[in-house]
Image: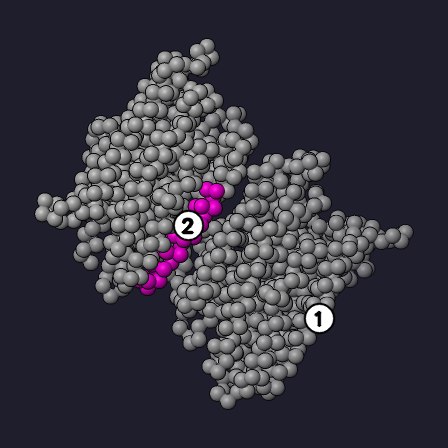
Amino acid sequence: MPAYFLEIIVVALGLLILMVDAFVKLEDKRTLSWIGMLGLLVVFGLLFRVEAPESTDSPFWQFYAADDRLALFFKGIAVLCTLVVLIMAYDFSPVVVDQTADPEPGAHPQAGLGEFFALPLFACAGLMWMASATNLVSIFVSLETVTIAFYIMVAYLRRNVGSLEAGVKYLILGALSTGFLVYGFAWLYGVTGSMQLSEISAALASPDVNRIGALFAFGLILVALAFKVGGAPFHFWIPDVYQGAPTPITAFLSVGSKAAGFIVLLRLVAPFLASEALSDKVVVALALIAVLTLLIGNFAAIPQKNFKRLLAYSSVAHAGFLLTALACSPTESSGNALTPVTVIAFYLGAYLIMTLLAFLVMTTVRKSIADETFDAYRGLAKRSPFLAAATLISMASLAGIPLTAGFWGKLFVFKLAVDQGQWVLLVVAILGACAGFYYYLKIAASMYLSEPDAKTQTIDNSPIPIGKIARFAMIAMIVAVIAVGIKPDLITGLFV
Amino acid sequence: MLELIVFLPIIAAVAIALGSPARITALGAAAVTLLLTLTLSAQFNTSEEGAFQFNSSRDLLQIDGFPHLALSFGLDGISLVLLLLAAIVMMAAVWVAPAESKIKGSAKLYYLSLLLIGGGAIGAFCSTDIFFIYAFHELALIPTFLMIGIFGRGEDRVRTAWTITIYLGVGSLILLAGIVMALVGVGADTFNIEDVVALAKRPETAIAAGQQTWIFGLLLVGFGILVSLFPFHSWAAPAYATAPTPVTMLHAGVLKKFGLYGLIRIAMPMLPEGMQALTNVLLVLLLGNIIYLGLVTIAQKKLDRMLGYSSVMHMGYVFLGIAAANHIGVGGAVLLMFAHGISIALLFALCGWMRDRFGTVDFEELGGVAKHLPRLGLLFGFAAFASAGLPGFANFAAEVAVFFGAFQVGENVSQNGLGWFQWTTIIALWGVVISAVYVLRAYRSLFYGESLQKADAPADMTWACRLPVLLLLGTLLLVGFAPEILNQFIRPAVEGLFLSTHGG
């Protein structure tokens, strides 16, 4: 089965949800999310049955990578991430219903919930397409498919000012970055005369390439993608948007959107890095952004008091580590399997598990306590030891403590930096890891060391109810974080 | 069987998390671990020089451009002795831990953390893969943080928990940087300690001398923080005074030895020239431990803080043995690690018992205890004398070896006069006097003199309380009278260490 079938299935799933929502009378619209979850599970299984096409003569293959295990790996990330987002959305739906309730009499009490389950699927299809895109046109179209779905999802809680504000911010800045991207593509086309990445690569590699034009194109593209992945100094939308968006969508933004940004970045930067005339300048630009991102992400996270905002800065910080890996690209191929591409793939895989685990806990807690600051987590260890343990493990992994998945991601990045002799980056990355150690542990401290304060005590101290699927997903992810921490081969084996 | 020993405490911790009764599971796991360890040491082949025994290995990661990672375990004489130490102290620590009903807060978390701290130490000593030596030690970090923060004593416990965690976390990162630089320096394609050391000893792949000094410096700071080498000692005494008794026993007795173990296992064989270049610095620092911190210990007014400082002070002797870098010195250092670990755990156990009963261990508030509780007095007396290095206890045999080893370094003394090592040894000998002073002072003011509470003296130690203490004390006496029990393991291992240093 060729890979593009999967995107078609996912789009069909989304449409199916919309159709069922419109034409079938459902008592509880949350049932719709089951269609999505089961469908995505099937798609995930099918990922392992993908075969390379027999012939690639058709013009379609100019837009779509024919045989690429890494692309499949990224598709897997997209599918798993969307699956977990749907699980969270299922748990989160009371909040959605509450914030989107229609005042008109006679309307279904859960009107508007159906789209909340369908939109992630459309975004997922875009993400999967993006993983295989090999042409500027298909990259752009898939990227916009994802972004437009996100515009709606971020602003979904229409009775909530925070969500609307986040939506507007995301829309304006997203549109701006799209502008940069298109302009960069135009310059790139102007310099190389092709939309095809392989041809662009060949054109850039020739010694008589227009260096100024190519570097200008690179700069524009880098700015646009730095917006998408949260690279400083283009990260400033992240804390506000993450805080305002519905929690499942924040998780989706933080994992899915970031992963997508990095695939595109990897694909677009590779031709520039391969070109002798350009690579040194490109590496300097990437290293600069990486240093800034590491510093801002890690040190701005320290004073945060809101869990979602903290995870927003943490997401910036992790973008910093990923950019560090990218900036440590070897100028000539060493034949090693440990390249920035594989390191970034591994890091994103590990990041997926640990971040989604944190967001799952957050969604569960948010259902019971309408508060997202650390206060809501005070004394959580006494109330719900399981949730506290899950958060602790996810934080330990994000901080990069050994025997968790996060440690290997960081160690691989450090190794790349040492191999390439990027000492400044290495020192900044280690400093950032030190800071991370503190602010992630701070959450653990508020859960374990402090008593529930007056504000949360008024609710009650009974255990927070955890949905059955959410509990299962959390256990699976805890096991995965530790298993990958002991045997990183579990992820690297998928694409090396 | 070695794998079972390593994973038993961790499996037990998971079982407790899943709902198995906490104290019984923990005690069972500790007891089985101790039994298995004793069986293993009976099977240990003492004639094999330096080689690791009971090896097992499972591949975890093979990828070009990154060292080969395997979950591998093995024991040589040095790690066997430390494994014995860890198993014995873990048994005693779990034993003296309070009953589940007496723990304020979650008893599950309490016992689970204890097992993870113990299991981390055991794993670190049994691993033969540098990554896992490091990683198992880190396993203890967060449980220690939680134990001090939740179950610690006093208002300051949260701050103390942060201090020790950040101190040790930063120390671990410096250590990691040093280890990575050493691995890259020899161009290692594996994390296996034997292979890496062999690479470091081959002239073609050895690290250049100038670089060795830098890397050894990093490792010395990293390990030094973990061992509370002067001037990185300030976390230790407050943390030990605040932490619950079993955690203090495990941390001061076992975990702190990890840094010393790392120096012997990783830094010394891989970076001989770096070590030589920094030996004099190390000598000055260790005198800071012995003399300066010895005097600080004398000035303490509470038993728990005094014990905390004394444990920091005694690390100076171990460093002296390691710095000597000869058979007797290093052998003595390993023996001293064992002896000190047992004796400090014993003292902290007794101190914790007293603090629970009397509510204070202040020298000025408490006195005349021996009159009412003679059994406690006797046990404490034994423990205190052992710690001061009285002949007949393991500490004495070990300290003597360290002093002999250090004094021997260098050329013929009668021809060349006294060198750095000889002077250091002579000064360090005064540390024995300092130990005697503070131990006797503490003993006098707590157990003799005027009793402040005559009527409400608690009952003396029951058998349930005495057994774990007797286990530790018995070990000290046994090794003190027959150090050969452990020396038979240590000697070939240390010889192997040096054999390959000079051979290649």
Tell me what residue is drawn at x 44 percent, y 11 percent. Answer: B454
Residue at mark 1 shares a chain with residue at mark 2: no
Looking at the picture, which amino acid does disc 1 mark?
Answer: Ala
The picture places residue A252, in percent across and down from the top left corner, at 65, 59
- Residue that mark 1 sits on: A175
Residue B168 among magenta residues: yes
The picture places residue A35, in percent across and down from the top left corner, at 70, 57
Relative to B217, A241 lies left or right: right
The picture places residue A496, in percent across and down from the top left corner, at 46, 66
Q: Mark 1, residues whose alpha carbon is within 10 Å: few (<14), some, or many (≥20)?
A: some
Q: State the predominant SS element of the stretch in magenta.
A: helix
Q: Which residue of the protein is positioned furthest toward the top in this rendering?
A: B455
Relative to B441, A464 lies left or right: right
Gap in angstroms between the C-alphas marked 1 and 2: 44 Å
Tell me what residue is drawn at x 69 percent, y 49 percent. Answer: A91
Q: Which residue of the protein is positioned furthest toward the bottom in this rendering?
A: A208
The picture places residue B249, in percent across and down from the top left corner, at 39, 33
Tell me what residue is drawn at x 24 percent, y 59 percent. Answer: B201
Q: Which subunit holds the residue at mark 2?
A: B
- Residue that mark 2 sits on: B172
Q: Is residue A280 visible?
A: yes
Relative to B166, A108 lies left or right: right
Provide the residue span drawn in magenta: B163-188
